[in-house]
Structures are given as structure tokens and as C-alpha cells.
Image (cartoon, rainbow, N blue to C red):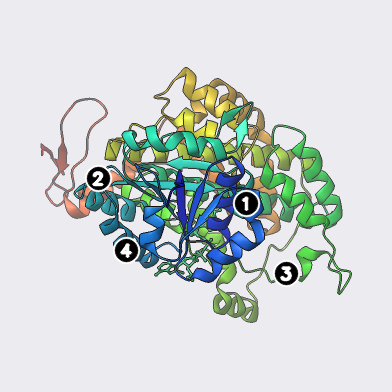
């Protein structure tokens, strides 16, 4: 075969197909492969005119059609399929070639695969890709991990097809081994939190404010013009204004109110627990979905007639819509602050040296959580790369302190009216915990020392101490 491809894609379902087309549309010759040849054939028949494709029926032909170092993008169902593809391709590749897993892999799998392939002289790049099928075709946000040398050979191609903001690509080398997939996972966790907070805002505007879905769509549309401007706010307005053609009812009213939580949101919380990072916003959003899907429990609660508040009451002290906007913005800041803290903790744990500002930069377009305020996150980390929490940055401090009275009113109204707002209330609790000069953790340490001799530290002198709780006078000893 004379003509060689700069890059190849194996796995040509919706994501792989669109990525391959995106590379071709940018002038790259793209080798194509899929387990079953039908998808490869279909792609060439339907979209062959968009660029230069080299379809291959076998893995061997595919590998032979690639220039060296070979760049093989794997876009298959995450999990055992990825291992199957790696096992098939690794023996056909040569030293310095690259396998790029662009699926939604767990970062621990990516670490394992990278280590195994490194031993064989191959580069393995776990690349987070966000933006769904539209993003894959028109410009996703790309979060590649793996060895830095592989980014030198691969980065320019990825940057070519990535989304752009002011000409700058939403793609950067995140860090070694699993760093890219870790950041993609946290991105998805933040997405969960953002969606939950938006849903709570809608619920309050509907149940307390008495607004119709169409009116709330207008409110979201106006918020989208301001500091909350983001893809998720924009599509929320679209979903809320949608009317069901069959019944004439608002679309949101004909959809079963059970959300799924199988994937990366859950992984984010599991990883956060291991790292000891309180991502309460993301956790609440995963749990809220789990509650929504808990049909037996919800049915039992309805049948038992769990009562709501005896008196409803009004939202007092401020305009509900303006207050909900403040609560939403403040809670969103908390969710992002927690997500970035998790990225920083993992970066430290695994020695990834991730630049948090660069992550905010590559999320500004192409991905689901693209939002205006990511510019401010980028600026915050540019000013202070080791910022302990975003809430300490001037912009976010001002935003949250300006929002806090409204935020509290919203949480009070939700509690008084019996409307679940776990995202808003847990974000507020996190904010109050961070700013507290004393936390009741002191009492917990006392309890732990009482029943388990776990010791405690004193506020007035260094060292570890234990109180002899059973002894007369309960003397304290150095532990
Ligand atoms: P799917 O996740 O539905 O996977 C289908 C592809 O995997 C087909 O090409 C299929 O080949 C191949 N495959 C399977 Br299944 N088992 C295989 C095996 N044992 N060996 C070789 N190939 C195998 O495709 P998708 O929806 O395009 O998603 C691809 C990846 O992108 C996934 O990891 C997914 O999580 C991720 N994703 C990301 C986003 C995003 O927003 N970033 C959105 C959607 C998906 P076949 O044609 O022969 O059956």
C-alpha cells in the first residue's frame, strides 16, 4: 500500500465514526477499522467524500496502512472490549507506536494498561473526550494523558480537531498515565452536580414560584445571558419549552422522573472517598439520581403517607427568581471548587503535576460543562496555581459572599416547604463548614478517644493525648 494514514480509528460506532470524520475533514488521511466490517463500509459509503479514508478489513491491514509512529485511536465500549482491542493490536505494533483509548475508561484501568504496554515499548494514551457525538464531529474537548513524548507526536492532530476558543484548542497534555481519564471522570462528576443544581432551581421556580415550564424556560434563557451562561443552562431552556406532540403537555411532565447513575459520576465519588476529598455536590447529585430510581422506597413512602410540612409558607426576604439564581451560582461554584480540589489531590497522589488552570481552559468549549465562568477559574489558578480552594479566590469569594443571604433564603424555603434541594443545601453546608472557626469535629475526637483510645491533639500544646476516661478524675496522659 503506497498511501499511508496519519491516524487510524478502530471502533466506528457513533463516537469513533464522528472522530474519524473530524480528522478527515481537517485534511488528515484516516485509517478505518471496526470489529465487524459493516460499520467501516458504511462510513466510507456515506461520508467518503469528506476526506481521505483508508478502510481496512483486518487489524493487520489497518496497522500496515499507518505511517510511523503509528497512532491508533480506540473508540470501543469501555471495559473488556478495550482490553480485547489492545490484545489484538499490541502484537502488531512496533516500539514507539501509540494506542490512544478515547473511550470512557476508568483511570485505574488506564494506569494498568499504560504500565503493561510501556513494558512492551508501546505508548498508551488514555484520552478523555467530551462533547458527545456532536462534539466528536465538530470539535470536542480532549483530555489526553499518557507519556509526554507521545503528546509531541499526537498532540498536533488532537489539537486540530478539538474545539477552539479564540483560536486556542480545547486540548492539552493533562499528565502521565491515567491523568486524562481521571480529569474526564471529574468533568463528568461536575456535570452531574451542575445538572442536579439546575434541576433543583427548576423545581423551586415551579413549586414555590408557580411558574410554568415555558416561563421557566424564559428565566433560564435570560440567565444564560449572564454569569450562569453555559451549555447546560442553554439546553435546559430548550428542554423546558418543549411541548409533547402527542398530549400537548410540557415535555418535562411526560418524562418518567427516574434518572440513571451508573457511570462516571459514581466513579468520581468512589475516587473522592479514596482520596478523602469532600465532593459533596457530586455525591448528592449521584444520590439524588439513586433516590429518583428507588421505586420500591418511593412507593412505600407514598403508601405510608410520609407527611410534608404542616404549613407551607411563602419565600420571604427576597425575589424568588433572583434568589434562586444566586443559590444556583453559589452552589455551582462549590461543586467546581470540590471537583478541582479532587483533581489537585489526585495529581499529588499520583505525581501527575496537573495544571488546574489548563483544565478550566480546555473545558471552555466542546464539552458538556462549558460555561462562561470557566474563564474566571482559569484566571484564579493562573494567579495562584496552588490555590487551596477556588472559594478563596477574589472573584469567587465576592460571588459567594454576595449570594449567601439569598442562598440561605432559598435553602430555608425549600426546607420549610418540603421540597428536596440536596445540592443547594449541601453546598451551603460545605461553605459554612469551610468558613467555621470551630467545627464540632472536636467533640468527635473526644468520642473517639473515649471508646477507642484514638487520642486527640490539644489546641494549646503539641503532641498526642489520651484521657483515662475510666479512671477517677479522668487524668490526661501523653499518648
Ligand atoms: P459503544 O460504546 O456503543 O461501542 C460500540 C463499539 O465497540 C463498536 O465499534 C463495537 O464493534 C465495538 N466493540 C464492542 Br461493543 N466489543 C468489542 C470487542 N470485544 N472488540 C472490538 N470491538 C468491540 O460506542 P460509542 O457509543 O461510539 O462509544 C465509544 C466510546 O466512547 C465508549 O467508551 C463510550 O463510553 C464513549 N462515549 C463517550 C461519549 C462522550 O461524550 N465522550 C459519548 C458517548 C460515548 P461492533 O461494531 O463490531 O459491534
Residue 255 disc label: 3
Residue 414 disc label: none
Mark 1 highlights which residue? 195
Q: Which of marks 2 and 3 is in front?
A: 2
Mark 4 highlights which residue? 88
Q: What element carries label 4?
A: helix
Residue beneath the point at 62% across and 40% down: 370
In this view, the residue farthest toward the front is: 2
Answer whether residue 95 is visible to the viewer in this image. yes
| Residue 100 placement (x, y as % from top left) | 39, 49
Residue beneath the point at 77% across and 71% down: 254
Spatial separation of the CA atoms under disc 4 and disc 1: 39 Å
| Residue 434 placement (x, y as % from top left) | 45, 34
* Crowd tier of the residue under label 2, counting other residues whose Cα lies within 10 Å: few below 14, some 14–19, many 20 or above: few
Q: In this view, does 78 lie to the left or right of 398?
A: left
User: Nearer the N terminus, badge 4 or badge 3?
Assistant: 4
Spatial separation of the CA atoms under disc 1 and disc 2: 44 Å
Residue beneath the point at 40% across and 48% down: 66
Residue beneath the point at 58% across and 76% down: 295
User: Nearer the N terminus, badge 1 or badge 2?
Assistant: 2
User: Nearer the N terminus, badge 4 or badge 2?
Assistant: 4
Residue 95 disc label: 2
User: Nearer the N terminus, badge 4 or badge 1?
Assistant: 4
Q: Which of 148 and 236 is in front in this view?
A: 148
- Please identify the quarter of the rendering in which residue 451 is found: bottom left
Amino acid at each position: 500500500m503506497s498511501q499511508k494514514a496519519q491516524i487510524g480509528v478502530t471502533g466506528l460506532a457513533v463516537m469513533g465514526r464522528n472522530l474519524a470524520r473530524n480528522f478527515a475533514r481537517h485534511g488528515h488521511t484516516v485509517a478505518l477499522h471496526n470489529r465487524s466490517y459493516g460499520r467501516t463500509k458504511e462510513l466510507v459509503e456515506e461520508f467518503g467524500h469528506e476526506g481521505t479514508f483508508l478502510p481496512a478489513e483486518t487489524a493487520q491491514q489497518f496497522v500496515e496502512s499507518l505511517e510511523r509512529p503509528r497512532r491508533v485511536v480506540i473508540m470501543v465500549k469501555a471495559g473488556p472490549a478495550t482490553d480485547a482491542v489492545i490484545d489484538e493490536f499490541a502484537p502488531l505494533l512496533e516500539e514507539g507506536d501509540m494506542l490512544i483509548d478515547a473511550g470512557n475508561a476508568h483511570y485505574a484501568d488506564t494506569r494498568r494498561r499504560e504500565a503493561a504496554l510501556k513494558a512492551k515499548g508501546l505508548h498508551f494514551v488514555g484520552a478523555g473526550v467530551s462533547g458527545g457525538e456532536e462534539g466528536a464531529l465538530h470539535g470536542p474537548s480532549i483530555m489526553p494523558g499518557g507519556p509526554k513524548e507521545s503528546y509531541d507526536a499526537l498532540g498536533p492532530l488532537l489539537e486540530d480537531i478539538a474545539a477552539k476558543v479564540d483560536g486556542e484548542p480545547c486540548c492539552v497534555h493533562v499528565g502521565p498515565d491515567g491523568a486524562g481519564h481521571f480529569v474526564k471522570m471529574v468533568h463528568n462528576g461536575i456535570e452531574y452536580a451542575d445538572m442536579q443544581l439546575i434541576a433543583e432551581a427548576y423545581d423551586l421556580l415551579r413549586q414555590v414560584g408557580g411558574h410554568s415550564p415555558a416561563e421557566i424556560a424564559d428565566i433560564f434563557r435570560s440567565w444564560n445571558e449572564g454569569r450562569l451562561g453555559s451549555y447546560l443552562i442553554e439546553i435546559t431552556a430548550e428542554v423546558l419549552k418543549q411541548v409533547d406532540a402527542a398530549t400537548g403537555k410540557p415535555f418535562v411532565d411526560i418524562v418518567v422522573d427516574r434518572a440513571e447513575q451508573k457511570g462516571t459520576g459514581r466513579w468520581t465519588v468512589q475516587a473522592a472517598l479514596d482520596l478523602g476529598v469532600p465532593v459533596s455536590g457530586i455525591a448528592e447529585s449521584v444520590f439524588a439520581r439513586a433516590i429518583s430510581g428507588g421505586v420500591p422506597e418511593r412507593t412505600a413512602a407514598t403508601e405510608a403517607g410520609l407527611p410534608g410540612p404542616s404549613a407551607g409558607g411563602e419565600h420571604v426576604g427576597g425575589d424568588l427568581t433572583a434568589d434562586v439564581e444566586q443559590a444556583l451560582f453559589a452552589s455551582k461554584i462549590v461543586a467546581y471548587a470540590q471537583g478541582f480540589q479532587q483533581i489537585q489531590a489526585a495529581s499529588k497522589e499520583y505525581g501527575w503535576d496537573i495544571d488546574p488552570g489548563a483544565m478550566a481552559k480546555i473545558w471552555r468549549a466542546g464539552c458538556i460543562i462549558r460555561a462562561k465562568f470557566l474563564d474566571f477559574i482559569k484566571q484564579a489558578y493562573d494567579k495562584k496555581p496552588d490555590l487551596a480552594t477556588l472559594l478563596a479566590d477574589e472573584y469567587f469569594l465576592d460571588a459567594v459572599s454576595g449570594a449567601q443571604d439569598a442562598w440561605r433564603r432559598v435553602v430555608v424555603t425549600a426546607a420549610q416547604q418540603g421540597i428536596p434541594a440536596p445540592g443547594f443545601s449541601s453546598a451551603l453546608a460545605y461553605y459554612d463548614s469551610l468558613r467555621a472557626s470551630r467545627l464540632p469535629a472536636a467533640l468527635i475526637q473526644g468520642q473517639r478517644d473515649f471508646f477507642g483510645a484514638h487520642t486527640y491533639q490539644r489546641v494549646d500544646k503539641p503532641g498526642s493525648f489520651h484521657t483515662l476516661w475510666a479512671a477517677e478524675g479522668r487524668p490526661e496522659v501523653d499518648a
